Amino acid sequence: MSPDSPLSAPGAETTVTADGASGTVDPDYPLTPVPAAARRGLLSISVVLVGFTVFAPTLMAGASVGAAFPFTEFLAVLAVGSLVLGSYVAAIGFLGARTGLTTVVMSRYAFGTVGSKLVSLLLGGTQVGWYGVAVGSIGQMTALALGWESAWAPALVMIVVSALMMLTALYGYEGMFWVSLVSTPLILILAFWLTGRGFAEVGGLGGMLALRPSTEMSWALAVTTVVGTFASAGTQAANWTRFARRGRHAVIACVLGFVVGNGLMVFFGAVAALAFGEGDFTTLLVSMGMIGWGLFFLFGNLWKSNADAAYAFGVAGAEIASSRRKGPFVIGGVVIGTVLALTGVEAHIVGYLSLLGVFVPPLGGVLIGDWIARWRGGQPALATLTERVRWQALVAYAAGAVVAWVSNALALGIAPLNGILVALVLAWLLGRVTGSRTEAEPVTV
């Protein structure tokens, strides 16, 4: 079987000894480094990450930012925000390729074998919440588009689409690759077409440049909004880049996904809002009488994104329980997320999850800073780690989270970036000063 060929079946198990212990494990290696035989090429990694970032809610972020600036200034905001986000995620993605480990398993080196559970709970819990929001949005939007008035019809839609998303996540990396390969080009074609219609609606580029802002937003808040679209989810980019054959492949794929892909979605949302007064493509297509295309956009887009979310909380659960299989945790998280969707979580949790977007990125800052300070020459095998809790990482994370929260509350600079930088510098400094490092052969392959 070639490294890029499909797996034989969803949830299939195989025997590996990547961590020095034999046994049957999940073929996505939730606790062990991805071996060389299972690594993928640049195209495969790029398809998955671009599909990950082509995410409908990002359109609304673009709509809010685009309405607050002249078009040329909006483009500058987008460029700065995309550069910050892409640089951060590329660093996380590079570590994933170098170590072959998921973000939550990498955190064992920085936070300790027990301290890493905090990272798993925070990252996994965030993704369960987003999963519920997306499933609930699909059910409610379908009911709105088709004029359903009963409560059971959208509930049935939520259950069915949730099951499809769960199966994709259980299939693992390969399932997400094929969903991305099919849905992402079609969604991008639709988005480009609508954007072209938007420019025509306002009289071309000249008309777009002549539009005046209808709202106000500071540069700091605008860039924070662009960065915040995927700073939280981008912290888990290593979940997919660990399959990359080379570190540079991971970096290029992250740039394509989080600079180009995410940047385009912000751009599309801004143009739609400026031209039509509506940044949500699903609502826009329905209002244009294109109900079928609107539902296709919604389903295709959120299916892939939620499969990624389910995969993320599956590997987080496996790390917490030290289990070699992610499947039971994918199923458990899907059940919780679906119940949240059925209770109408999408109407209440978005603000809470946005706040987590401030608290999650400093985790990535800790991982990057600790790796630079202690592990550039290679990391020892996971089985050799003895520190249960590393106070250095906890202190660095707490400082970064506080700075990010204060920055967000007072609109001081770019809140996610502030948190990342403080956590990174402090983790690097404490790692260098304490010098706690185990000399061993690298686990990279």
Image: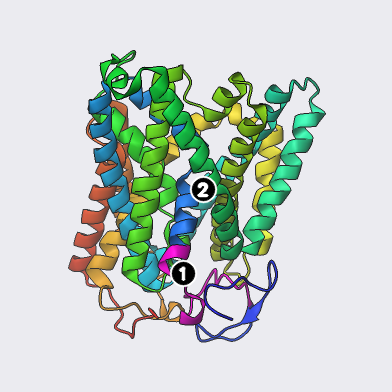
Q: Is residue 35 magenta?
A: yes
Q: Label 2: which residue?
A: 185
Q: In the picture, residue 158 is in which quadrant?
A: top right
User: Residue at the spot x=42%, y=46% of the render?
Assistant: 232
Task: Locate residue 428, reporting x and y percent.
Answer: 22, 61
Q: In the picture, residue 392 is in which quadrant?
A: bottom left
**13 versus 398 height, above or below:** below
Q: Which residues are magenta?
A: 25-44
> Taking the image as drawn, is residue 391 in sight?
no
User: Residue at the spot x=57%, y=57% of the render?
Assistant: 176
User: Residue at the spot x=33%, y=43% of the render?
Assistant: 401
User: Residue at the spot x=43%, y=59% of the render?
Assistant: 46
Q: Amino acid at mark 1?
A: Phe
Q: Label 1: which residue?
A: 243
> Taking the image as drawn, is residue 362 in sight?
yes
Task: Locate residue 211, reporting x and y percent.
Answer: 30, 15
* Marks 2/1: CA–CA distance: 22 Å
| Of the pair 178 and 36, the residue shown nearer to us | 178
Residue 336 placement, left or right of 404: right
